[in-house]
Amino acid sequence: MAGSVHDLRPRTQAETDEDGDGDVSVVCQTDAAPRIPEGTYEVGFVSAKKTDFKRRPLVYLTFQVADPGPYLGVRLVLACNLRDGRMTESCKYWQAWCLAAGTRPQRGDRMSTLVFRGLRFRARVRDVTTTWQQAPRAEHMIYSVIDCLLERTAGGTGR
């Protein structure tokens, strides 16, 4: 069982590092998520991305702070679990979509992220203080996310 904690055989160069100096370098592929004070902010929709986490579908809605001040332009994410595509009234995406569309969806409606384009919302921002395993994060690893959209404040007329 190569690589396990019980494997006591000496490591080869290929398993440790390329040049044999005992150092392995890993390149950071993302920018650090921003942290701003918790509270409510006006935000404008920027983009949407669908992905999977632990084989569960998620939509990440990215918004940009529109309030004048030191956090103007900061981008924050609203992560919405899609629950295998089944939308109910308790789902974060369902609630955000209804605010954006100005109406409730009918059974079978396609709930596209296009409904968010050009819209602004009042959003509640909170800190992420634990990992997905509920372990506490160090102070320098805490970041901000949008917890929920509270109301639509500008743009569009719904669907």
Image (cartoon, grey):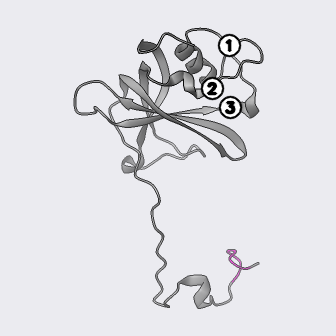
Report how many numbered discs are placed on residues in the image: 3
The crowding category of the residue bearing disc 2, from other C-alpha atoms within 10 Å (few below 14, some 14 to 19, many at least 20), is few
Q: Quadrant of residue 75?
A: top left
Which label sits in the foreground, 2 or 3? 2
Discs 2, 3 touching: Cβ within 8 Å: no
Residue 150 sits above or below residue 69 on the image: above
Q: The residue under label 1 is which amino acid type?
A: Pro
Q: Tell me where the magenta segment starts and ends, as one range.
A: 2-7
Q: Which residue is mark 1?
A: 105
Q: CA distance from mark 3 to mark 1?
A: 15 Å
Q: For the residue labelled by badge 2, is the local secondary structure a helix, a strand or a loop?
A: loop
**Marks 1 and 2, the one that precedes in the sequence:** 1
Discs 3, 1 touching: Cβ within 8 Å: no
Within the magenta stretch, is there residue 10?
no
The crowding category of the residue bearing disc 1, from other C-alpha atoms within 10 Å (few below 14, some 14 to 19, many at least 20), is some
Q: Which residue is mark 3?
A: 82
Within the magenta stretch, is there residue 5?
yes
Quadrant where the image shows the C terminus: top right
- On the image, the x and y values in percent for residue 104 come to 64, 10
- On the image, the x and y values in percent for residue 62 come to 47, 35
Q: The residue under label 2 is which amino acid type?
A: Ser
Q: CA distance from mark 1 to mark 2?
A: 11 Å
Quadrant where the image shows the N terminus: bottom right
The residue positioned 60% from the left and 8% from the top of the image is 103
The residue positioned 73% from the left and 11% from the top of the image is 106
Q: Is residue 9 left or right of residue 114?
A: right
Q: The residue under label 3 is which amino acid type?
A: Leu
The residue positioned 22% from the left and 28% from the top of the image is 69
The residue positioned 39% from the left and 25% from the top of the image is 43
Q: Is residue 97 left or right of residue 77?
A: right
Q: Which residue is mark 2?
A: 112
Looking at the image, which is closer to me, 141 or 122? 122
